[in-house]
Amino acid sequence: MTTRLCATPDEAVAGIEDGSTVLVGGFGMAGMPVELIDALIRQGATDLTVVSNNAGNGDTGLAALLAKRRVRKVICSFPRQADSWVFDDLYRTGRIELEVVPQGNLAERMRAAGAGIGAFYCPTGAGTLLAEGKETREIDGRTYVLEYPIKGDVALIGAHRADRMGNLVYRKTARNFGPVMATAATTVIAQVHEVVETGALDPETVVTPSIYVDRIVQEAGPR
């Protein structure tokens, strides 16, 4: 399948359906595809399950999507921070669901989805509330918890550069969850700082190959 270069973020997010599971890249605001999220707000999809590292910062990006009441459930590692007042209010008033997943498990569950792994055992969370209701197993004297992959209908990720073929290069810590999310979703949409001609990227620096990327759009505003 050929990656599509979209003229606008609105074109890039067209067709995302109500009830979709949306993987959203970013560690806080680092690497968060804000223009794609804003376009998703305009697009109108609702009843979404959002998978991300945290539950939004301030009033922009993911927090803005939550404020519009488009999200039914959040799956994340860090739901509460000093500036997560949007999510905090929604959760305290019973208007949003939450599944807390340890950060390493979150990454591995998405990686497992991309790798075609049906489930895996992990010691993280064993003996805590996070393991309640989950299958456990003793391996070499240690308790492990059975975890299942997290698959997305759509992944919205941010990258530094893309070529016209759809190969992606990230910038430093803004990479974060982008690569694993790109393997775990049916449709992958990347917001990039710059689009270059095919062949202009050093193949050794490409982290996400174009085979995983369905649509790319260049940022309109400054980063």
Image (cartoon, grey):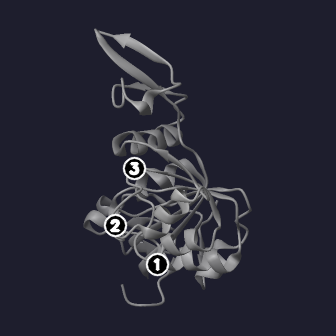
Give the quarter of the image for residue 9.
bottom right
Q: Nearer the viewer, residue 174 or 2?
A: 174
Decide if residue 18 is on the left or right side of residue 103. Answer: right
Give the CA separation, mark 3 to mark 1: 19 Å
For the residue marked with disc 3, what is the amino acid? Ser
Residue shown at 60%/79% (left/top)? Answer: 39
Q: Is residue 87 visible?
A: yes
> Decide: marks 2, 3 in contact (CB < 8 A)?
no
For the residue marked with disc 1, what is the amino acid? Thr
Q: Which of the labelled discs sits on residue 170, or is there none?
A: 2
Residue 195 horizontal/vertical position (percent):
45, 80
Q: Nearer the viewer, residue 59 or 124?
A: 59
Tell us which disc is closer to us: 1 or 2: 1
Q: Which of the labelled discs sits on residue 77, or is there none?
A: 3
Q: Nearer the viewer, residue 157 or 55?
A: 55
Dot 1 or dot 2, earlier in sequence: 1
Classify 10 Å Cα crowding around label 1: few (below 14), some (14-19), many (20 and above). some
For the residue marked with disc 2, what is the amino acid? Tyr
- Can you name the residue that lies furthest to the left here? 172
Residue 179 horizontal/vertical position (percent):
41, 55
Residue shown at 50%/65% (left/top)? Answer: 89
Residue 70 horizontal/vertical position (percent):
65, 67
Tally the numbered discs: 3
Q: Is residue 216 visible?
A: no
